[in-house]
Amino acid sequence: MLVEIKVPDLAESVPDATCLAWMKNEGDHITEGENLIDLETDKVTLEIVAPHSGMIISILKKEGEIVLSGDILATIDTESVAVNTPQSTQNSENIGSGEFSKNAKTVAQKIGPAVKKLLIEKEIDPNLIQGSGKDGRITKEDVNLFLKNSVTSEKPPQTTGMTSPRNREKRVPLTRLRKRIAEKLLAAQEQNALLTTFNEADMSAIQNLRRQFRDEFSIKHATKLGFMPFFVKAAVESLKSYPVVNASIDEDDVVYHSYFDIGVAVGSGKGLVVPIIKDADLLSFAEIEKKIMDFGERAQDGKLSVQELTGGTFTISNGGIYGSLLSTPIINSPQSAILGMHKIQDRPVVKDGEITIKPMMYLALTYDHRLIDGREAVQFLDSLKSCLEEPSRLLLDL
């Protein structure tokens, strides 16, 4: 039976996608669930997997071609199934043709689409690389380190002549995701009246809570107790008190959202992405932590769905994990505000008339001044600071 492989339904905010590398060629046998091609959208890279085992009869869309929802990518014959022989399971196939060895099946399952594309481009056998990620997963850093070591071991003799500066340049086209990020950041600055207000929070209470209940929390919920759930919860409570910060402008109207979909900025192999924690006000600390951990892992593998990156009423960006001490984040339009977290640093502060050392974090709130007045922005950030310094407020609804 002939089966058509189609582009899945894309989100309303994603008009089309670009075909990246085909993992198989016409005439190749495939197994159900095997990745056939990656599609790059403005927000995420999608893996298109085989719905059935069989053989690829025809490939209708080439690499680099723009496709729409419902377009036919390829056709497979489900009645043509490869027969495994001892010899076939022992021979490795050339990764340059887009196929991994059958002995490397478990290795291939630990490779995300971005890494797989890099391996194919560089014609590297994944079995030669020791993965440093979770469960032995191969990361882009592992591939780059392998390439660096390979270049070092094969480095040609030094020449005494001068090297032209032109030979030290490399021109690489921007990915769709990088282009989209650039467009959105520029649009946010051009179309909004952005202003940033700052405050700082004493993180002692949260640090003490984490130390006190870390082991018990981990055993009960099978996840660690991080800082982000406290910030998500504090943001939700403060948004309830200042709903205009959770609102957005739609042409001549102000849209007030009665739900709290909190975007959490995470880094991926291709740039910054912002998956959304839907209805964050209805989730527990453990549920929020598990969602954030899951988002982070799947962002590295390029496995976040378009739906998970669409929407959101407020965003939290944590530059502190990269060592940032202070920043002015840019809002994620059409949202009206974004919270910037930063590095926790021991600093001298005055407490009850005495100088003491406290673990402090600078907080930054960038907001659209067209909608949010300075008074509301400052009061929102002060409310969030109070929730962080006294986490009991989150339990007592104060």
Image (tube, grey):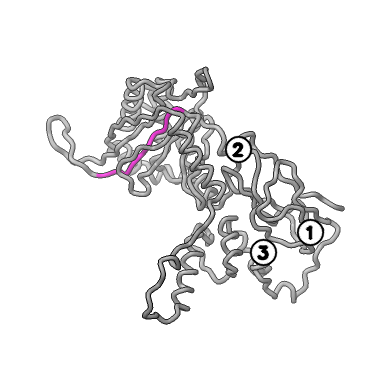
Q: Is residue 188 left or right of residue 160?
A: right
Q: Say which quarter of the image contains residue 69.
A: top right
Circles 1 and 3: CB atoms closer than 8 Å: no
Which residue is painted at 42% across and 82% down in the image?
A: 157
Is residue 334 visible in the rendered structure shown here? yes
- Residue 221, given in percent of the width and then of the height, sits at 48, 42
Amino acid bearing label 1? Ile
- Residue 297, given in percent of the width and then of the height, sits at 51, 50
Q: Which residue is mark 2?
A: 307
Q: Which residue is mark 3?
A: 98
Vertical comparison of 37 with 17: above or below: below
Q: Which mark is residue 56?
A: 1
Nearer to me, 39 or 137: 39
Write down the region rendered in magenta.
336-345
- Disc 1, SS: strand
Report if residue 392 lies within the magenta region: no
- Disc 3, SS: loop
Q: Which mark is residue 109?
A: none
Nearer to me, 281 or 210: 281
Who comes first in sequence, dot 1 or dot 3?
Answer: 1
Cα separation between marks 1 and 3: 14 Å
Is residue 392 visible in the rendered structure shown here? no
- Disc 2, SS: helix
Of tags 2 and 3, the one toward the viewer is 3
Q: Main secondary structure of the magenta part?
A: strand
Q: Say which quarter of the image contains residue 385.
A: top left
Amino acid bearing label 3? Gly
